[in-house]
Image (cartoon, rainbow, N blue to C red):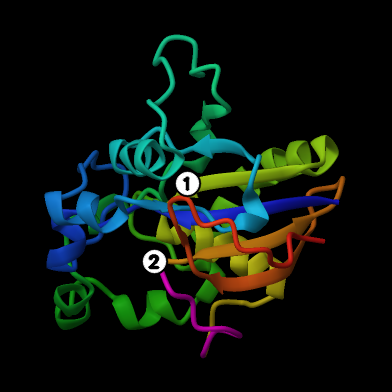
Amino acid sequence: MTLLGMIRHGRTAWNNDGRMTGRADIPLTEEGRLALDGWRPPLELDGATWHVSPLLRARQTAEILSGTGIMDEDSGTSGRGLRIEARLIEMDFGAYEGRSLEDLRADPDAGMAENESRGLDFRPPGGESPRMLQQRLQPFLAELGQAGGRHIAVAHKSIIRAIFAAAYDWNMLGRPPVKLRWDQAHLFKVDATGELRPWRMNVPLRPQGETTDRETGP
């Protein structure tokens, strides 16, 4: 059984403004970088292989949390266990890119109420739905499940929510089974077919150098 830890990237200027950030390649703010500095993934993920979205905000986050330089762009790896994984790229928000949820809900032409009522099939014009993300991620998850061991994926809110929804069999309507904290790690079990089960949600990052014994995985 594979253990997968999902970690969201740090804060960006668009996050601070409440703007939907899909494929726009926005860097971390200085405050976002400082908030990550000195922290490492939970001990459950010690020795894990890192898989990182190609977007800058995720790569910068992986650089800080791993304590190493990011991978070489041409080869896709640094030789230090960090790998660019294109399938972890954020959801394509299409026509909603750069707009705030508040603005979209107030815009009668956006049709947000109807769109949000679709749950997993919520889809911005010209963009992707969470169900499409799950389909995109399935081969990647199956590869991890067959590989075994421990893995960290540094990715995005929509990617983590899609994996969370699959693990809990949640249709993304109504309240989620667990309220996720976006500054913490979320741990899942993955079997050889790529099927997911929740392991531990909202696991705090640890201060650099902390070695306190704790439960270390399935």
| Residue 102 percent coordinates (x, y) | 18, 79
User: What main secondary structure does the magenta stretch of the protein show?
Assistant: loop
Question: Would you say 27 lies left or right of 36 here?
Answer: left
CA separation, marks 1 and 2?
12 Å
Q: Which mark is residue 154?
A: 1
Q: Secondary structure at mark 2?
A: loop
Q: Is residue 85 a member of the stretch shown in magenta?
A: no
Q: Amino acid at mark 1?
A: Val
| Residue 45 percent coordinates (x, y) | 64, 51
Q: Residue under circle 2?
A: 183
Please state the extent of the stretch shown in magenta in the rendering.
175-183
Q: Residue at x 29, y 36 (%)?
A: 56
Q: Amino acid at mark 2?
A: Asp
From what the image shows, is residue 165 above or below residue 129?
below
Question: Would you say 97 lies left or right of 187 here?
Answer: left
Q: State the quadrant of the C terminus.
A: bottom right
Q: Residue at x 78, y 42 (%)?
A: 149
Query: In this view of the protein, which residue sits in the foreground, 81 or 196?
Result: 81
Q: Is residue 178 a member of the stretch shown in magenta?
A: yes
